Amino acid sequence: MIQKNFWQGLRQISVSILTIASATLTIAPNAAAQAAAARKTQNVIVVIIDGMRWQEVFKGVDPELIKTVGPAGLPAGKERAAYAEKLFARSSQSESRTALMPFLWNEIAAHGQLFGNRDLGSDSHVTNGFNFSYPGYNETLTGSGDPRINSNDNIPNPNVTVFEWLNKKAAFHGHVAAFGAWEDFNGIFNKARCGFPVNASYDAFTDMPATPELTLLNHLKTEGVRIWPDEVFDPPMFYTALEYVKYAKPRVLFIGLGETDDWAHAASYAEYLNSANRSDAYLAALWNLVQSMPEYKDKTTLVVLPDHGRGNGAKWTDHGQDIPESSQTWMAWIGPDTKPLGERKSTTPVTESEVAATLAALLGEDYHAAIPNSGAAIHDVLPQ
Ligand SMILES: [Zn+2]
């Protein structure tokens, strides 16, 4: 009996070891497959709201700045300020920020994550040291600051953006596009080299068949009043991007909104707020559109951020190296892989240099390994 039990026992142990071994063998590939299956993002959209301060994003209208009437050259300054105050000023910061950016606070705060409220210990910033646009876009799109990118001159970017890097991969080739109000996007993305459509500023968009809507948008863009020689108003640029989304369904899309920065430099707080509110409405329109399309629905991640911050108090109109606080930014993420943690508190600081690798990681690509100089992906917004 003892002998029999011994052999039976040994046999059972052997079977158990074999079972464990085979289970271990099958667990490894399953875990990898599970991790891949867990990642739902198939498309990424980057929207940059140029020079939009974290202060208004998280605290709404500044009660002091709303009293300023803006430049004498802009008619009806007093009425503009009063109207913006009526639209966006409220008795609490949380009501005011929701009035100003309802999509950010009703949709992204409920289903995504917002970084950058310093009052709650969440820091987001640029690392390029310049605190102005081209260096900020370059950092965000390539994953690191570059001391050679030290002006806003519209020069062809010597660096390769994560957009161009993805466009070289078979899965994304021909499914990448960039639209922006500022003419420098031609340089930032290196339009001549990058191999995907880049439509910037007052240029007509001709990289898709003409539709009645596109034809009208091209008229508005090329014939409209040019307040800023290097930057078209946001609406015709934004709706051109939407037309292209409907037509080509790009998997990697950039939209650069510019009016917030221009009106801030012009010292019109009212128009700065109006353009922030319009930018938020564009986020809602874009999100509603993609969520209505099977190619995008519940498999698209959207990130929204500025390219730099601005000064505090009376210095709110400006930014740059001599205004240290203008390195302060914010970022908002929403998508099927990003946990709905809402307005973040007490986080590890996030930087614009981490955005490129994060976008790639959400698409299943390791940009940080390929470009070690780039910031690592932001763990908190990736599938956990
Ligand atoms: Zn600026």
Image (cartoon, rainbow, N blue to C red):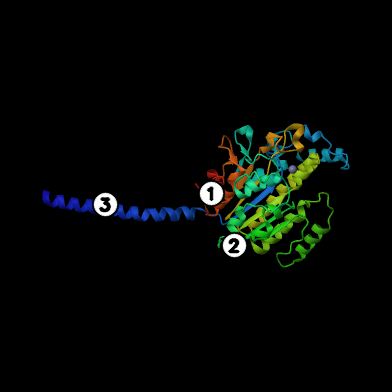
Between marks 3 and 2 in the image, the one whose residue lies nearer the viewer: 2
Disc on the earlier residue, 3 or 2: 3
Labels 2 and 1 touching (C-beta < 8 A): no
**In the rendered view, would you say 30 is above or below 123?**
below
Residues 338 and 228: in front is: 228
Residue carrying label 3: 17
Q: Is residue 103 visible?
A: no
Q: Secondary structure at mark 3?
A: helix
Q: Secondary structure at mark 1?
A: helix
Task: Give the Cα separation between the discs numbered 1 and 3.
Answer: 40 Å
Residue 86 location (% of width, % of height): 79, 39
Disc on the earlier residue, 2 or 1: 2
Q: Could you tell whether 332 is left or right of 233 in the image?
A: left
Residue carrying label 1: 368
Q: Residue at x 63, y 53 (%)?
A: 45
Count of all numbered marks drawn on residues in the image: 3
The amino acid beneath tag 1 is: His
User: Which mark is drawn over residue 307?
Assistant: none
In the picture, residue 75 is in which quadrant? top right
